[in-house]
Image (cartoon, rainbow, N blue to C red):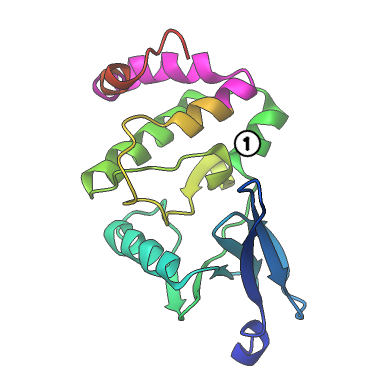
Amino acid sequence: MKKKEFKSISVSRVIDSDGRKTLIINNPTDFRLIGKGVQGAVFQLDDDRCIKFYVKKSFVEKEMKAYEAAKKYSFIPEFYERGSNYIIMEYIKGPSLYKYLQKVNHLSQSISQQILMIHRELKKVGFTRIESKLGHFIVTDGEVLKFVDHSDAFSYFQPYPNELFTDLKKIGLLQTFLDHAKELDPEQYSEWGKAVDLEQI
């Protein structure tokens, strides 16, 4: 892996007249695109590492703050290097939780327990917004979850995981998760219930 090769990659963003944001990717290399969003794009460098390029340097700072706060946790990818517009981190092998749950059509109590634990622990270290879309969880061997993409961890306060709920509802597994949460972590379930009617979402 040569820096001069991956440094030729760039990402930018355009906003159309309707306010829609579109990511523009310039990749003259052979590094495989493995993910993209409104803030940047991720490429696989080798079997163990990936690199995320950001459209703004401020996004690098935000994600680095989150990695520093949560670095002790095994569910957070290992950090290797940062540049002015990129971060190199551990490449996690496995499908996203969204794809995994679509395939198995079942939400195990073990997975729900891990999601609840991740929310609880990240709240302890100061995350005010835990952007837990199902696509941000990676399912590794043994159904162990890793959690990626944390640039908005301190952006604003989000009292309940609305994106997680939305994703689970789409695939018909929200009620299963809420039943697990009520049994496994009644305190966290109760906190969410103060912010949103869990019977009506």
Residue positioned 45% across, 60% down in the render: 77
The 10 Å Cα crowd at callout 1, few under 14, some 14 to 19, many 20 or more, is some
Residue 153 lies, in percent from the top left, at 36, 50
- Relative to 42, 58 lies left or right: left
- Residue 126 or 145: which is nearer the viewer? 126
- Tell me the residue at 63%/70% (across/down): 11
Q: Which quadrant does the N terminus fall into? A: bottom right
Q: What segment carries the magenta color?
A: 168-189
Give the left or right position of residue 201, taking residue 138 as reference: left
Position of residue 32 measured from the top left corner of the image (x, y, whole percent): 73, 68
In the image, is residue 119 part of the stretch drawn in magenta? no
Element type at mark 1: helix
User: What percent of the width, then of the height, locates residue 194?
Assistant: 27, 18
Q: Residue at x 30, y 64 (%)?
A: 68
Q: Could you tell me if residue 45 is visible in this image? A: no
Pointer 1: what residue?
Answer: 98
Q: Is residue 183 magenta?
A: yes
